[in-house]
Image (cartoon, helix red, strand yellow):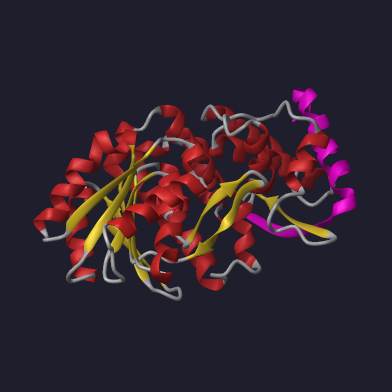
């Protein structure tokens, strides 16, 4: 087992290893001597792992109360949030009690938002069950829900008390969902670790899940510790996300998060190349690694559609939008773009899609 300590407003440990789901009760009871736990999950994860989580909690004297959501991005909603708050109030949970998130990024976001707002904050434990949630969503304290206007527009920054990444749970992931998480792993390589990116180019990450997850969490931990409230350098973690969120929204969330982010990363690499900011090999290497792992390299949405969706981004200023662009594989920077140049930048990046031989 590996572990990292995250030194934020509330310090906590991230544990990475096999069969950690059976230690949930120990971790919760060590942090909270006497408490009840609302275990938030979705129908898919409930059928796979809820019984094990319940057994662990009960063995340590923690009473578990289940709350089950439908799987999928649609559950990242006011309705789901209200459902969780309803259970917490009906069961008369107190500030001594906790929410345990057992699921992927959607479950983790809703759990974190509910825990941070119920009674102005109760305990939160993250037990991510997907690669994407292990390397990204469960660490750093960001959580929230979507609105009709865009993704993640409503939320808080609220750190968990502990994160348990059980690598054995990845064995039950469908390939498409595992690939979804690989997009976030690729992102970490592009923005801060050329060796990680090269390793992904040359070997199967499933052969060393624990090491890959550890390195991604370490990269995110280092950035979050420097900018917990997301005012400057933490924006680097949004590489590919501004346009990725636009793709998700335009697709009605039928395109998965990681797949959309991969499209966004390639668009940003193309934009950086057009602006002569990045090395020539960035785009072809990103496209090659995307194809290797069955991730998309293009989108059918028009420039005007993407620009309109991007304009709803929560980080947009009155005149500028901050975009993350790679200067080379392993290093990216935040580049402010004038809003009146956004449509031209988007169109130029999209135009290259029709000429695959150019890359």
Q: Residue furthest bottom?
A: 9
The quadrant the C terminus occupies is top right
Q: Is 216 placed left or right of 54 in the picture?
A: right
| Residue 156 x %, y % | 52, 63
**Is 5 or 310 nearer to us in this picture?**
310
Q: Identify the residue shown where x is 27% and y is 41%.
A: 168
Q: Main secondary structure of the magenta part?
A: helix
| Residue 220 x %, y % | 50, 60
Q: Residue furthest front?
A: 90
Q: Identify the residue shown where x is 27% and y is 51%.
A: 17
Q: Is residue 232 above or below residue 272?
A: below
Q: Identify the residue shown where x is 42% and y is 58%.
A: 114
Count all numbered tags in the image, as a single digit: 0
Q: Is residue 243 above or below residue 48?
A: below
- Residue 330 seen in the current view: no
- Residue 346 seen in the current view: yes
Q: Is 45 placed left or right of 58 in the picture?
A: right
**Is 356 or 76 nearer to us in this picture?**
76
Range covered by the magenta-colored residues: 330-359
Q: Within the magenta stretch, is there residue 248?
A: no
| Residue 204 x %, y % | 42, 35
**Is 143 or 164 nearer to us in this picture?**
143
Q: Within the magenta stretch, is there residue 337?
A: yes
Q: Identify the residue shown where x is 23% and y is 42%.
A: 50
Q: Is 236 placed left or right of 77 in the picture?
A: right
**Is 270 or 95 nearer to us in this picture?**
95
Q: Is residue 206 above or below residue 124?
A: above
Q: Is residue 277 above or below residue 263?
A: below
């Amino acid at each position: 087992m590996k572990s990292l300590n995250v030194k934020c407003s509330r310090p906590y440990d991230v544990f990475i290893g096999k069969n950690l789901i059976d230690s949930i009760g120990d971790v919760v009871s060590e942090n909270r001597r006497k408490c009840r736990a609302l275990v938030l999950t979705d129908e898919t994860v409930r059928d796979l792992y809820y019984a094990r989580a319940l057994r662990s909690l009960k063995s340590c004297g923690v009473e578990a109360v289940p709350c089950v959501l439908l799987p999928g991005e649609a559950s990242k909603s006011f309705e789901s949030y209200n459902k969780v708050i309803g259970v917490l109030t009906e069961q008369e949970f107190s500030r001594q009690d906790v929410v345990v998130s057992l699921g992927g990024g959607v479950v983790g976001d809703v759990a974190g938002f509910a825990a941070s707002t119920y009674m102005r904050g109760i305990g939160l434990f993250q037990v991510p069950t997907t690669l994407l949630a292990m390397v990204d969503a469960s660490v750093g304290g960001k959580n929230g829900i979507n609105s009709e206007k865009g993704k993640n527009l409503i939320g808080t920054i609220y750190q968990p008390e502990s994160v348990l990444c059980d690598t054995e749970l990845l064995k039950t992931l469908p390939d498409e969902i595992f690939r979804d998480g690989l997009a976030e792993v690729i992102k970490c390589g592009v923005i801060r670790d050329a060796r990680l990116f090269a390793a992904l180019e040359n070997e199967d990450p499933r052969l060393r899940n624990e090491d890959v997850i550890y390195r991604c969490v370490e990269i995110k931990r280092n950035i979050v510790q420097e900018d917990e409230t997301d005012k400057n350098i933490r924006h680097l973690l949004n590489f590919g996300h501004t346009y990725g969120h636009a793709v998700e929204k335009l697709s009605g969330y039928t395109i998965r998060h990681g797949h959309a982010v991969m499209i966004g990363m390639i668009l940003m690499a193309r934009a950086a190349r057009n602006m002569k900011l990045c090395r020539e090999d960035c785009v072809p290497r990103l496209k090659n690694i995307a194809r290797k792992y069955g991730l998309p390299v293009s989108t059918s949405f028009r420039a005007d559609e993407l620009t309109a969706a991007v304009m709803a981004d929560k980080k947009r200023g009155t005149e500028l939008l901050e975009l993350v662009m790679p200067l080379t594989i392993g290093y990216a920077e935040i580049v402010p773009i004038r809003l009146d140049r956004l449509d031209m930048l988007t169109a130029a990046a999209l135009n290259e899609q029709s000429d695959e031989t150019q890359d």
